[in-house]
Image (cartoon, grey):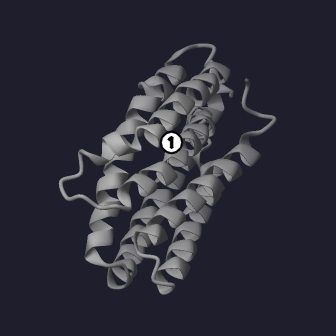
């Protein structure tokens, strides 16, 4: 990137980031309003707890590396991808096989919790893969390239969750929506980054 291009790229990226944030918040709020009318409160509580656990595991998976990669002159995205796949794979296996232990942290016993945790284990690896491509776009001040994947992610979550909720799938509406959305997000980010990101 040429020095004279930086101000324009910064402006475009800032605009894209703001638009993405407004879209995400608006869709998330709207979807939550609808789903809370169609998903039982106990199921929503189960989902909120599980998602919080996976947010913590996601932070452990990243090890603070995405931000650090951008500070290095050579920006080793290949190494970051390796860490996200290998270390992310280890955490995914831990979440899957250790689901009964993680379920013990939940205050109220629920026989579905182990299955929910095991299903959500795939979220760790999917989000890890997406993170690499997303960090690349951030480093290149090309956040606009992540706008379409973000829109598709939210639309996928809403569509899958609404369909499953209409079929009275309860907590699985949220799990299915999240996994489908994460898969679409990772895939579309990598389609846009492939051939450009130095690995």
Is 36 drawn above or below residue 199 in the view shown?
below
Work out whether 9 lies above or below 44: above
Q: Residues within 10 Å of mark 1 (few under 14, many from 20)?
A: many
Q: Position of residue 143 (x, y in %)?
A: 58, 46
Say which element carries label 1: helix
Residue 35 is drawn in which quadrant?
bottom left
171 vs 44, left or right, is right
Give me the residue at 55% from left, 47% from top: 122
Residue indicated by mark 1: 124
Q: Residue furthest right?
A: 195
Query: What residue is rendered at 36% in x and 57% in y?
Result: 113
Q: Is residue 56 left or right of residue 61?
A: left
Identify which residue is drawn at 31% across, 59% down: 48
Q: Position of residue 179 (x, y in %)?
A: 55, 57
Question: On the rendered structure, is 178 left or right of 79?
Answer: left
Residue at screen point 57% across, 76% down: 159
């Amino acid at each position: 990137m040429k020095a004279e291009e930086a101000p324009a790229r910064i402006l475009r990226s800032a605009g894209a980031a703001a638009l993405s944030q407004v879209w995400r918040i608006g869709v998330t709020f709207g979807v939550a309003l609808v789903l809370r009318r169609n998903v039982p409160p106990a199921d929503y509580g189960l989902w909120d707890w599980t998602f919080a656990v996976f947010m913590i595991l996601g932070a452990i998976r990243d090890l603070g590396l995405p931000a650090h990669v951008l500070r290095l002159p050579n920006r080793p995205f290949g190494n970051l991808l390796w860490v996200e796949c290998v270390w992310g794979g280890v955490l995914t296996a831990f979440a899957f096989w250790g689901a009964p232990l993680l379920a013990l942290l939940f205050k109220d016993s629920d026989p579905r919790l182990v299955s929910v945790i095991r299903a959500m284990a795939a979220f760790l690896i999917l989000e890890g893969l997406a993170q690499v491509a997303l960090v690349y776009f951030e480093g290149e001040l090309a956040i606009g390239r992540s706008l379409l994947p973000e829109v598709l992610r939210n639309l996928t979550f809403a569509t899958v969750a609404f369909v499953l909720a209409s079929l009275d799938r309860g907590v699985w509406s949220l799990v299915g929506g999240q996994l489908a959305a994460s898969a679409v997000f990772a895939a579309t980010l990598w389609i846009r980054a492939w051939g450009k990101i130095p690995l």
